Image: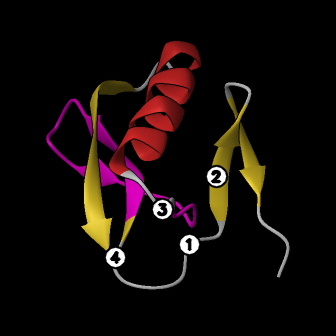
Amino acid sequence: MAYRPVFVMSDGERATNAQKFETEQEAFDSAVDRFRVWTIPSDFDTEECEGPVNYHRVNGRDERMES
């Protein structure tokens, strides 16, 4: 299984993107970084998802994995 960052909007809507990480911690760290610079979400989270992992965290940054 993979994990992806989730952004919770003020109306409760949960928004995601195409990033999928191998670990929940990587997805969480990515969500924290992005949450700090966005102004619309009111919270963040992670969720388990289907599909291949396509990102990982390297030195505190999201890095796209080569196919």
The CA span between labels 1 and 2 is 8 Å
Q: Secondary structure at mark 2?
A: strand
Q: Earlier in the sequence, mark 1 or mark 4?
A: 4
Q: Which mark is residue 22?
A: 3
Q: Are marks 1 and 2 in contact (CB under 8 Å)?
A: yes
* Residue at 36% over, 83% down: 50
Locate residue 65, reporting x and y percent. Answer: 77, 65
Q: Are marks 2 and 4 in contact (CB under 8 Å)?
A: no
Q: Are marks 3 and 1 in contact (CB under 8 Å)?
A: yes
The CA span between labels 2 and 3 is 7 Å
* Residue at 46% over, 85% down: 51
Q: Are marks 2 and 3 in contact (CB under 8 Å)?
A: yes
Magenta span:
3-20
Q: Secondary structure at mark 3?
A: loop
Q: For residue 33, which quarter of the picture?
A: top right
Q: Earlier in the sequence, mark 3 or mark 1?
A: 3
- Residue tagged 4: 1
Foreground pick, 18 / 25: 25
* Residue at 85% over, 72% down: 66
Looking at the rendered image, the quarter that the C terminus falls into is bottom right
Q: Is residue 17 left or right of residue 60?
A: left
- Residue tagged 1: 53
Label 4 Cα neighbours within 10 Å, binned few <14 / some 14-19 / many ≥20: few
Q: Earlier in the sequence, mark 4 or mark 3?
A: 4
